[in-house]
Amino acid sequence: MKAIFLTAALLSASALSACTSQAEVKPERKAKNVILFIGDGMGVSTVTAARIFAGQSKGLAGEEYELSFEKFDNLALIKTYNLDAQVPDSAGTASAMNTGIKTQIGKINVTQADNFGGCADRKAPVKIADLADAAGLSIGIVSTARITHATPAAVYGHAAARGFESDADVSKNARDAGCTDLAAQLIASKADYVLGGGTAPFTAGRNDGRDLTAEWAAKSPDHAYVSKASDLRALPSAGKDVLGLFTKSHMAFEADRDNSREPSIKEMTQRAIDNLSARDTGYFLMVEGGRIDHAHHGTNAYRALTDTVAFADAVEAAVKSTDPSETLILVTADHSHVFTIAGYPKRGNPILGLVDSAAGKAFAYDKDGNPYTTLGYHNGPNIRKPVSEPLTQAQVLKPDYRQQTAVAMNAETHAGEDVALYATGPGSEAVRGVMDQTEIFDVITGALGLTPNE
Ligand SMILES: [Zn+2]
């Protein structure tokens, strides 16, 4: 537990300059806390479709509905490319946000000269969490993916390959060079409150026989490890440094989640805020909706949209339980997906359904005489072909239905267009225009008065 009280946290630069030399003046700290929400793969088309889906689930036509973060005042478009990739992955994009430096695809918080698979433990770029910890702030990480997956790992770790989740995954070259795995890096990090999935890299999936969950709990009498939702709920809301890992790998999709076994992203976010805000240190909290991306890779729009709505609910909980004058809330995606909303369905047509017809027929038909869905993917496993059995509405509305694709691939891919960044709270005025993803680092460090170059 950190015990620094920041009752004077919002001191202005001019007040500081009265008692320090000019050279020592720190940038003004505008925000006491920053919460960075990342919807993994939550491109603009996903937000639009989720908005309609959420509105229709409330009995509305849907198009007019607003997700929680769509009410924020400040907005930018974010360029997401990696150092070497037009269409990025989550490792490179999370690195850009956490260090202000783009990496090659698949690498987490390494210098641009690091070779893939090599040791990245030397000269790792400084992360937001490093600067925040040095300034006495507390650090929280929440994800519905494995906590060693690329997006959460970029908050606390660095690796020349995103797959270095346990010691069993680290390449021989990297091991010989003294590199450590991401699970071990989390346990050794300054993170104060961590909830997500993925016990395997901490326990059974290791070669070295260590039980890193036990090592977390042994760090101090104030440290606690939980693996059951009921044990998390039995903990006091404040006073503990918590590691909670509820599944062997990723947590369930929201559509499949058993609340008695796994907390929702909203519950995890709420508990993180309750715990971190009670410290009165100020905090940096990253919350990832990690499985929007996974549902899209399987071209299953239903689970992608239900996870996006659950993610928006977590943002709403954060807005309601923080002071808008002291907490900067950012909501973004790391990258987009090849997910489209197309055809000319009429207003209020079920977003997961077949495109209806304006010509008095039941549905609109393609050149082969087959109906088609509003939602589709450019590539992925369920390629569209001329079919003898036309799609039916009942078929496409089933939760397990995989939308059709144009290009046959085993898994649907990310997309390269810009994503949105929504912002509210102190420092959010810096979010405007077309920005590079690395500038999210500048927005956060700027709001917290952290000085990256020290
Ligand atoms: Zn992905």
Image (cartoon, rainbow, N blue to C red):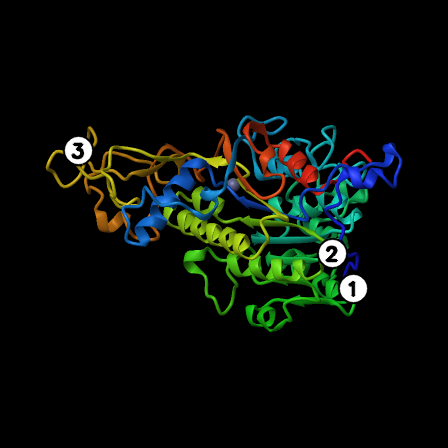
What residue is disc 3 on? Answer: 369
Verify CB contact (< 8 Å) between mark 1 and mark 3. no
**Res. 158 visible in picture:** no
Q: Quadrant of the C terminus?
A: top right
SS for tag 2? helix
Chain-order first, disc 1 or disc 3: 1
Disc 3 to disc 2, how far (Cα)?
A: 58 Å
Residue type (three-letter) at the residue carrying disc 3: Gly
Residue at 50 percent across and 30 percent down: it is 418
Residue 303 position in % (x across, y down): 40, 50
Q: Amino acid at mark 1?
A: Lys
Q: Residue furthest left?
A: 360
* Structural distance between the alpha carbons of marks 1 and 3: 65 Å
The N terminus - image quarter: bottom right
- Is 69 or 398 nearer to us in this picture? 69
> Is the residue 165 above or below the residue 347 in the image?
below
Q: Which residue is mark 2?
A: 187
Of tags 1 and 3, the one toward the viewer is 1
- In the rendered image of this protein, does residue 203 appear above or below residue 65? below
Circle 3 SS class: loop
Where is residue 262? Give x, y as percent.
Answer: 52, 64
Residue 126 locus on image (x, y percent): 76, 38
Q: Which residue is mark 1?
A: 219
Total residue callouts: 3
Residue situated in front as seen by the camera: 36 or 255: 36
* Label 1 residue SS: loop
Contact, mark 1 vs mark 2 (Cβ under 8 Å): yes
Reading the chain from its start, which is encountered first: label 1 or label 2? 2
Q: Residue 49: in sight, yes or no?
A: yes
- At 66% from the left and 47% from the top, the residue drawn is 153
